[in-house]
Amino acid sequence: MDLNILWFILIAVLFTGFFFLEGFDYGVGMTIPFISSSENNRTLVINTIAPVWDGNEVWMITAGGALFAAFPHVYATMFSTFYLALFLMLLALILRGAGLELRSKHESYTWRRLWDWAICLGSALPAFLWGVAITNLLRGLPISDKMIYMGTFYDLLTPYTVVGGITFLLVFLFHGMAFLHLRLVEGSLTHRMHDWAIRVGALAIFAFLVCIAMTYTLTDLFRSQLAAGLLFGAALCFVAAYLASFKRRDVPTFVGSSLAIACTTAAFFAGLFPRLMVSSLQPEWSLTIYNASSTPYTLTIMSIAAGCLVPVVLLYQGWSYWIFRKRLSRKDLELY
């Protein structure tokens, strides 16, 4: 296989894994200030992601590193384009990580509520910004023939990209609630979560369909039959997950939301291929897997390294989820 195509697929897989895993982390984080007035309940919710949240973020770091190594021109242009947005995302992630680590260091109600809101903001802002970034990449950006972004930060905020950001936020929120249903023993907390999931899921479906309609009219994604099929499949999976949530079927709900996120990410990359960043000024100025890639020698060495290391990482993370597969209840609660 062409190494350029191989690394495009690998980066797509890494981002798919990131959105699937970190998506429910973001969703759980967004619920914490609202889910219950009980300190024990909020701590229980945090405990569902406490063993895995930092490992899930490694997928983003790995995807960014792979992008830098395989397609350095894309990395350079993308980071200059989204500099302020990525800076805000980094601050939010630092705030979120600090909240998850520092919340338990003091028993003061005010201290813990402050960090609850920090975790919520640090989860909601990245979710929104990822949606803005993805829809911008689909819509196209004013990139010159020198691979330089010619716009400003405010050019990134359009009705389409804002809808994309809201859609990501709502889908991740529903995904997080589905994860909580899967991880918590049935009780008053899960009943409250179910009621929330019904409302959030309805809003997410509406936003998802609006975003798909705007994607059809404002981008060329639907020129790819594979991308169109994947996006249609994502919509069906999400609706199926929502219907399963009505019947309190935990596993089908989580599987459906997971497949919706995976199919949406796959549709994004399929719609872009072989491009990585679309130029709205001239189509031939777009950054592709060929004009923005590293040398064949670099790609060869990286392929060997990835072939050796990626299976180890996947086995380790799979093992960690297996170890922490048990549903949590108040009996397992340890205030920390």
Image (cartoon, helix red, strand yellow):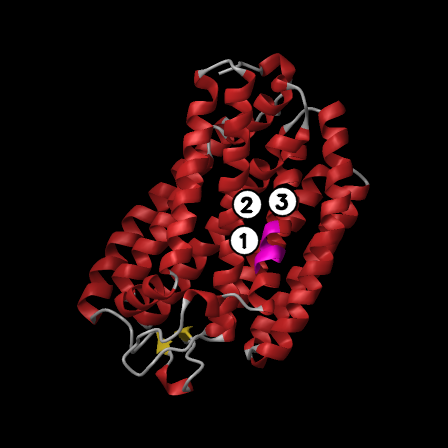
Image coordinates of residue 103 in percent, x first then y, are 47, 23
Determine the main secondary structure of the stretch shown in magenta: helix
Which quadrant of the figure contains the N terminus? bottom left
Label 3 belongs to which residue? 173
Q: Quadrant of residue 244?
A: top right
Q: Which mark is residue 246?
A: none
Element under disc 2: helix
Mark 1 highlights which residue? 128
Amino acid type of the residue tagged 2 in the rendering: Ala
The front one of 142 and 208 is: 142
Counting residues from the N terminus, which is met first, the one under dot 3 or under dot 1?
1
- Disc 3 and disc 2: Cα gap in Å? 9 Å
The mark found on residue 124 in the picture is 2
Q: Taking 271 as reference, is 241 above or below it?
A: above
Where does residue 7 sit, x and y in percent of width and height?
34, 64
Nearest to viewer (mark 3 / mark 2): 2
Residue visible at 78% across and 37% down in the picture:
195
Where is residue 110, by image quadrant? top right
| Mark positioned earlier in the residue sequence (3 or 2) | 2
